[in-house]
Image: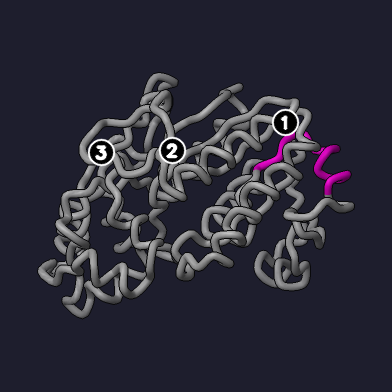
Amino acid sequence: MRIFVTGATGLLGTRLVDSLISTENEVIVVSRNANRASNHFRNSSIEILEGDVTLQGDWQKTASECDAIVHLAGAGIVDRRWTTSYKKVLRSSRIESTKNVAEVASKILICAGSTGFYGDCSDQELVEQDPPGNDFLGLLCKEWEEAANCASGRVVSLRFGIILDSRGGALAKMVPLFRLGLGGPIGNGKQYWPWIAWQDASQVVQEALHQGWEGAINAVAPEQVTCREFTRTLARVMKRPSIVKTPAFALRMIIGEGSCVLTASQRVNPRVLCDKGFQFQLPTLHNCFVSLLRA
C-alpha cells in the first residue's frame, strides 16, 4: 500500500513508519520541517513532503493519491499549560488538520484520537458506544472524530490510552523519578488509567488499515488499572518504592487545567478489538513494563 502519514516524527508515528516500511508499504510523510524529518528517519525509502496539515496546501494532492492516510498529527495535550491561546493550538492542530485530511481521504482514513473522549467517568466501564464527556478534552475529541467522519472513504477513529514506550511519552518521564525513589500515585490514585504498549498500538493501526475496520475503536490494553496500581506495578518492576504522592491540587497549580488528563478516571474496555479477535502482544501491565524496561 501507498500510505500517507501525518505526525510521523511523534512517538507512535516513528514506530509506525518503521513498521510500515518493514511490511513493504510505500510511506509518504508530511512535516512542517522536511529537513528535520529527513534527519529523524534517515531512511531513503521514505518520501518526505514539507507542509502544514492545519492549512490547505499542495500536500493534499499527494495525500489524495495514496491508498490510505494515517493521521497522527496534533499538539501535545500535556506539553504546556492550557492557556486560552494553547487551547486554540490544540483545537487547530487536531480539528483543522483533520478537516483538511478528511477532505482528500477518499479511500481509507485512520485517525488517532484519545480516551479523553469520555471525560471523567469514575469506575464506570466505558465502551465505544458511550457518549463523550462535557469537559474541554471530551468536546475536543468529539469534534475531532466528527471532522474525520466527513471523509468520503472508510474511517477508523482510534481512541488511544497512554501509549507506553521507553523512548518517550509518559513512561520516559516517569522512569527517572522512580529511579530516584520519587514515584507514586497522583491524587487519590483511584482514577483508572487506560494504557497500551507501543507494539500493540502500532499493530492496531496496521490491522485497521488492512482488515476493513470502521468507526470508533478503543485502542487500549484489556487490563484495566488504577493510577495506584499503575505506579505500584512500575515500582515493582523497577525494584523501587512507590510512596511519594502528588496531590491533585498541587498538580493543578503546576500544569493548570491540563492536569485533568492525569486525574480523570476512564475505565476503558477495548470491546471492539476483543470482538474482532485482536491478539495483544502485551496485554498485562507487568509484562509490558518488563518488556520495555528490561529489553
Amino acid at pointer 1: Ala
Could you say whether the residue bearing mark 2 is in a helix, strand or loop?
A: strand
Q: Is residue 249 magenta?
A: no
Identify which residue, 175 or 190, lies in the foreground.
Answer: 190
Binning the other alpha carbons within 10 Å of mark 2 as few (below 14), some (14 to 19) or many (20 upward) gives many
Q: Report which residue position mark 3 lands on.
A: 223
**In the rendered image, which quarter contains the C terminus?**
bottom left
> Residue 219 bears which disc, if any?
2
**Is residue 225 shown left or right of residue 210?**
left
Image coordinates for residue 142, horizontal then vertical, percent: 52, 38
Q: Is residue 69 magenta?
A: yes
Amino acid at pointer 2: Ala
Could you say whether the residue bearing mark 1 is in a helix, strand or loop?
A: loop
Q: Of callouts 3 and 1, which one flags the residue occurring earlier in the amino acid sequence?
A: 1
> Residue 151 bears which disc, if any?
1
35 over 96 or under it: above or below: below
Q: Residue at x 64, y 47 (%)?
A: 95
How far apart in space, not on screen, are marks 3 and 2 (Cα)?
A: 12 Å
Task: Specify the segment rendered in magenta.
Answer: 60-70
Amino acid at pointer 3: Glu
187 over 110 or under it: above or below: below
How far apart in space, not on screen, are marks 1 and 2 (Cα)?
A: 21 Å
